[in-house]
Every structure is written in C-alpha cells, then in structure tokens.
Image (cartoon, rainbow, N blue to C red):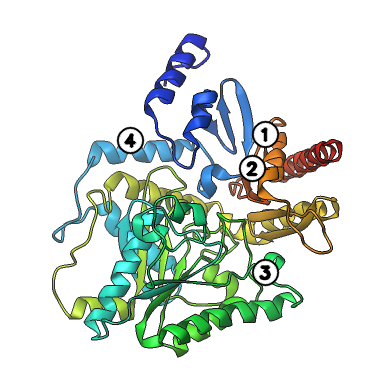
Amino acid sequence: MMGLSDQAILEQLQALDRMHHLHPFTDPQAVKKAAPFVIEQAKGAYITGQEIRLLDAMAGLGCVNIGYGREEMADVAVEAIRTLSYYHSFSAVSNPYAAALAGKIASLAPAGLNKVFFANSGSEANETLIKLAYLYWRRKGQPSKRILISRDYSYHGSTLATTRLNGNAPMIEDFGLAGGDDVLQATSPFWYRCGGDLEPEEFGLAAARDVEKKILEAGAENVAAVIAEPIQGTMGAIVPPDSYWPELSRICTEHDVLLIADEVVTGFGRTGHWFAQETFGFEADMMALAKGLSSGYAPISAAVISDEIADVIEDKGGVLHHGFTTSGHPLASALALKNIEIIETEGHVEKVHADIGPYFSKKLKTLEDHPLVGEVRVSGLIAGVELAKDKRSREQYPLEASVCNHVGQMALVRGLIVRPAGNVVVLCPPFIITHAEVDFLVGVMRDALDETQRALESS
C-alpha cells in the first residue's frame, strides 16, 4: 500500500473517493463537505490513518474479534491463493477449506445444528434462512406458512428481504419498502425504553408473549418463523432480561413456528460462549453467522440449519435453486478456519467469559453514576451506554440534539472509536483488548461524557 505520509497522494485518493465512492450508511452531502478519513493500516486493537492512531472499541463493525494484522492470517491467505485461488461450490463441487469449515462449524454449534450453507454477508445468510424456511414449509405441505415475525429495534441486513425485517424506519421508508402483511413487528425486549413500571424479568416475559400475540393474530398456520438477534447490537446493544429467551423459545415450539437466531454479531465468543444461545439458554432451529466467522479478514457468512429441517429439504429431493458465485470461497473459508483456530488455541471464549468480559463490565458500569448515563448494558464484550435526559423517568434526549454523536466525537478526538446509535453509545471491542486498554476506554468515555455535559449546560 502506498504511504499516505505524502500529502499529495492522500489528497488525490480523497478526491477520487469523493468523486466515485458511494459509501454505505453515509450522507453523501457529508462526503462533499469534508474529505473522507483514509485508514492506512491496523494492528492489534488499533487503526491508523493520516498519522492518527485510534483504539478501536468497535472492532471494525463488531467483527475483528482476533484483532487486526495477524501474521498467521496473512500466511494462510497467501497459501490459499497459491493453492486454490477460486472455484465454485455449485453442482456438488467442494474444496478442502469449505468442507473442513462446514465440519468445524457443526462441531461447535448448538446440538442439532449440523448443516451449513455458505454466503458472503450476514444479510445473505439471513435471506438464505428465510428462503430455506419457506422451502421447508412447502415441502412439509404447509405452503401457507409465509409470515415472518421480527421485532422493534431489530437489524437483519440490507437486502430487499432483510431490510423489511428491520426495526429501523428510515431503512424501510427511504426505499418505499413499507407495507405488506407478511412481516410483523413485535415488541423488543428493551426494558430501559419499553419496560414501563415492570421489573426486567416481568417485562422479558411480556415482550416474549407479544410475539405470541402476533402469532395468534396471524394464525400459527400462516407463520413461518420468528427471526431475532440474541442481543440487538446495531440498534443499541439491547441485552434482554434472562426470562425472555426461554419463554420465546417455548412459544415458538408450542405454535410450530421456526426460531431463527441471528448470531451475526454474537457468534464465535462475543458473549463469553461460542454462541449466545448458550448464554441465554435456548436452542434455535436456524442461525445466521458472519462477522466473527473470519474476524472480518474476508467476506464470509454461514446459514446453519437443524437436522430436522435439512432432512425435510433433502429427502424430498430436487435441486436447491439458491447460491452465490463465491459461496464457500477457498480463501474466505481458509481464513475462517484459521480464525476459529486462533480463538480456540488462545482461549478467547473462556477469557471473554471469565476474565476480560467481567473486567470490561465492572469498569464500564462505573459510568452509571454519570448524570448523562441512564444505564450500562453489558454481555461479554458487547455493551451499550444508554444516555438519558432524565435518569428517574428514563426520558431520552431528542435525536435532533445529537447528544450521542457529540459523545462519540469527544471520544474520537481523545483517541477512541465508539459507535453512536441514537441515544446509545455502542462498544464491541476485539477479544484481544487488555485490562489497561479497558481502563483507557472507560477514562475516555467519562471525559467525553463530561465534555458533552458541559456543552449541554452552556447551550
């Protein structure tokens, strides 16, 4: 990579980017007003760009679990490209890396989830699961089961189908995707915002039973699946009450509705177990995996289905008319295998569960005494710092006040990357973060909150 210490080269790249690069989840006008920040390199838990070094408390987009710039990952990439740069997996063709990776995922997955379909992103994995759910019910002679139930504050992807599942109004309304009765939204288990006077465990049961209400209103004979993130990461690191997931699982089983666990963020150790299903005590019929599968070193995702679903799909025969050019790509599969090996051999899941996760939680929760903080939610190495205009009533700041964005900017100028999400500061650091780096993170967050409070008081 060319060095960006040369100001002329940097400005040329920024000009090209501004003219030709349409950025995801970015206001194009913002790029026109200010040159994009060009990141040149990354190592460990830090990224560097334009001679600025930042601790990345978001691990990219909650994906770089093993940290940046691992030499062993580079070695695997070189070997895979030299050995088998590409071949497809259509028409019963495989490659050593994809075959081994499918077996590895099945060996780690919760019991009964043994069949793996490879894709390239969490969106594609979730859309694959939707199609497989439809196929399953059709082959069982129940084609009327087409309705999908999602939840408020959910995020399942950016394809046409997965966008409609999201609890993010602008993503739906901007593209004219609202309407239709095949996707229903249920209450999120977001106690802080939605719990009212109920205790958290009471509210967890009530939120699960709102899903049941939606099933009964639609008719269970018409509902294909409930799709839900164990922790709703993108919209605020929403950690559900402990009562929620066992009750939701019971409801789906009772009404013969498939349960899809979107473990794109939580899979591969984020919550201190290999999968959040273990953390929250439930078993899904299907699950989506992506971010932590390769730690972001290559685009890859997996749609994993139960033996029972696979048996119905396979025993009926016929071609599975679904797939992607790069499904099971040799390079991506090789990197995912090595990533999982690193997580295993370095004991990261155990460390998140018993060491760095509890330390992260203990230190971060000290921020709950700050006047701007309503609560701090933590599970393993994912957290949400909820801002509150009034701590007693749990009143939010109006979004147009951009209070959360101000906190994020104040953290950034102090050397820390976090993710503002409405009125929540989301943190999702790499597994390799140290105790000292957690201390730095929490100190910066307190300074950023103090600076924001002063700005609010002076306005």
Judging by the rendered image, the residue that carries numbered circle 2 is 418
Disc ID at residue 185: none
State yes or no: discs 1 and 3 in contact (Cβ < 8 Å). no
State yes or no: discs 1 and 2 in contact (Cβ < 8 Å). yes
Disc ID at residue 78: 4
Foreground of the two, 221 or 317: 221
Between the C-alphas of marks 1 and 4, the distance is 34 Å
Between the C-alphas of marks 4 and 3, the distance is 50 Å
Find numbered disc 4 in the image and state the secondary structure of the residue it sits on: helix
Give the label, 4 or 3, closer to the camera: 3
Give the label, 2 or 4, closer to the camera: 2
Within-10-Å neighbours for mark 3: few <14, some 14–19, many 20+: some
Disc ID at residue 412: 1
Name which quarter of the figure residue 59 lies in.
Answer: top right
Q: Residue at x 81, y 64 (%)?
A: 393
Within-10-Å neighbours for mark 4: few <14, some 14–19, many 20+: few
Q: Residue at x 54, y 49 (%)?
A: 62
Give the label, 1 or 4, closer to the camera: 1
Mark nearer the N terminus (1 vs 2): 1
Disc ID at residue 194: 3
- Considering only vertical position in the picture, is 127 above or below 260? above
- Considering only vertical position in the picture, is 182 above or below 399? below
